[in-house]
Image (spheres, coloured by chain):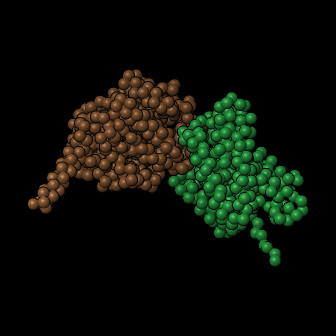
Chain colours: A green, B brown
Amino acid sequence: MTQLAQYLVGGLATGSLYALVALGVVLLYRSSRVLNFAHGDIATLGTFVAFTLLGRKLPFSLAVAGGLAAAALVGVLFFFFVLRPAKEASLLGKIVLTLGLALVLSGAVQVIWGTDTLVFPFPLSDTRVHRVGQVVVSETSLGTIVTGIVLMTLLYVLVQGTKIGLAMRAVAQSADAAQALGIPARKIHALTWGLAAALGGAAGVLLAPVVYLDPFMMLDPFLKGFAAAVMGGMDSLPGAVLGGFLLGIAESVFAGYISFKFKTTMAFAVIILVLLVRPEGLLGRVYHRRV
Amino acid sequence: MRALTRFMFAVAVVAALSATAVGQPAERGVTPTEIVLATSMPMSGPAALWGTGVGGGVDAWLRHINDQGGIHGRRFRFLIRDDAYLPPRAVANVRELVERDGIFGLISSIGTANCFAIRDYMVETKTFWITPACGADIWAGMRERNKFLFVTYPGYVDEGIYLTRYGVESLKAKNIAVFYQNDLYGQQGLLGVKRGIAQVRGAKLVAQVSYEVTDAEVAAQALKLKESKADTLILYATPRHGALIVREIAKVGYQPTIMSTFTLLDPVMFALAGEAWNNIYLATYIPVPGMGDAKVDATLATLVRINPALARNPFNAAAGVSFVESFLEGIRRAGPSLTKDRVVAAMESLKNWDGEVIRGVTYTPESRQGINRLFMVKSERGQYTKLTDWYTYPRKF
């Protein structure tokens, strides 16, 4: 039982990161129907900026804020200077544009910061632990879970409980109709890009102390976060969170009790099963277009 | 008469041209002033620490040789291609280097799976291949086809046997677990541990826990290792995953005796794993920089002067020198008229040869396994200390 609890705790910590990544992916998809393949690389860039600011002796909070701002800025600039001018492009074309951004950012990070594996300074220790009975939780894992949940709650409040959130939902439903009602759809789109990118940056900052900082650290988490978003439902923010946690826990338990070699395979097998039963995802909704 | 004169003149011209060609045999990648060498290494991706260190070390050492005028008036041009530790990219890189760039020799290549992917191509193209950084056991049984292959790198199977024997005989290991990368590199290390256990009495393998090179974290593996209750843990991993696992097991309160392959010897591990990289037992095939060997320390100082970034990666940088220096000695001994056959003959004349970093290199017409020795070191408070004298294992190829 203790073993299972330990695997669950490990899965929760990993799952909270998957959930953060998934939220950024879903937030953008809801508003623009664009799958952002540069999400992981934007997150990596933001984390490296935070790392550089920490190296300049800035307080941790300011350095992280700077990193998230940099990630958000990249998202906003990409929207204004690439996606907007290419607004007539097909959806597939826009997705390819995000792939291009991913390659550009990955190359830029490698040129600017190199490819060495680096230690990301973090105020919480990954080796100091808290014990609940026989179950061990490191300070970093605890911090990751709590911060992840706080960020998800804040996002939920923003989207569901504020005027900006209402505008975001309206634009997500129909940008033209929202514009006709006086909602600045373009600014809301830009805000959504910035917010999603900052969320990715937050995931990167939380991940870096656990897996070390290098230009490729988001490859696996992005893939899993994307899968979690699909499993939870690409339209659903709570679905993204649920998908992230379920994926993290399923991976951890499967690896612990059955096989390490097939844990990623298993994760995607579960997703296939879920989508066979519910093609719209766990909490996604089926939209019926009325003519 | 005029026709005969013309014919004789033409014959003389052809003969003169032929004589010139015979006098200066054109080897691919060699000109009177230059020798082109290259490598394909992971300069990015999960094994970038190895690639930037080893590749950087080779590059800096060749620059140093060039600064001294090269060898017999020829300077080296060294091309580095990034394969990101991916075998398909290694294949593409090597084909390009051989067929387009026309290199004289390939220096190393990191990753057992990568080396395996390009092995047959290298043999077929009869290109010098110097010290592929991979489990040397993949060359066993290929003796007849290995004329241009020279290796100063230990096999992971031999190393695994040595680690296990040392663990059982000197550290009283009874229950052994292995944390390994799920590819040829890790599997060869695991095989070595199994053979080591078979050779010594009183120990058993209680867990073999793998990870994929793309895995971002290894928390579940740490729990599995803890459950095994192994008293000794042997690592075959990348620096990143090696650092992650020792931190994770420390986190869950599991404290076995930790032993590791030499691929994790670089002091960068102290920065990555912190306190968790203390009291680790490792095998090595070269003297570790900073451990008191004056020649190695002087070599590292030269490398760092040329490329200051190598100060962060000193063992791998020195290893880069150890990979290439017996080949440079072969080129030196081959003399000004450089042909592949002359270099092969010169390399085969190396008997218990000591370089600046590598020690005791011997090649023969029958054996391309230049070294077959290891010794143990231990990490203590940010430094390595020597524990044993050389341990010799049988030559295989």
Residue B219: quadrant of the picture: top right
Residue A50: quadrant of the picture: top right
Quadrant including the C terminus of chain A: bottom right
Could you tell me residue B306's position as x and y percent?
A: 45, 30
Could you tell me residue B2's position as x and y percent?
A: 13, 60
**Residue B83 or A207: which is nearer the viewer?**
B83
Q: Residue at x 47, y 32 (%)?
A: B307
Q: Residue furthest left?
A: B1
Specify whether B32 is left or right of A153. Answer: left
Specify whether B305 is left or right of A239. Answer: left
Q: Residue furthest bottom?
A: A291
Picture layout, residue A238 above or below residue B157: below
Q: Residue at x 34, y 40 (%)?
A: B34
Q: Residue furthest right?
A: A181
**Residue A135 or B397: which is nearer the viewer?**
B397
Picture layout, residue A265 above or below residue A199: below
Q: How many marks?
A: 0
Q: Is residue B25 visible?
A: yes
Q: Residue at x 83, y 50 (%)?
A: A158
Could you tell me residue B68's position as x and y percent?
A: 35, 29
Q: Is residue A257 visible?
A: no
Could you tell me residue B134's position as x and y percent?
A: 39, 45
Specify whether A166 is left or right of A32. Answer: right
Q: Residue at x 82, y 58 (%)?
A: A185
Residue A280: quadrant of the picture: bottom right
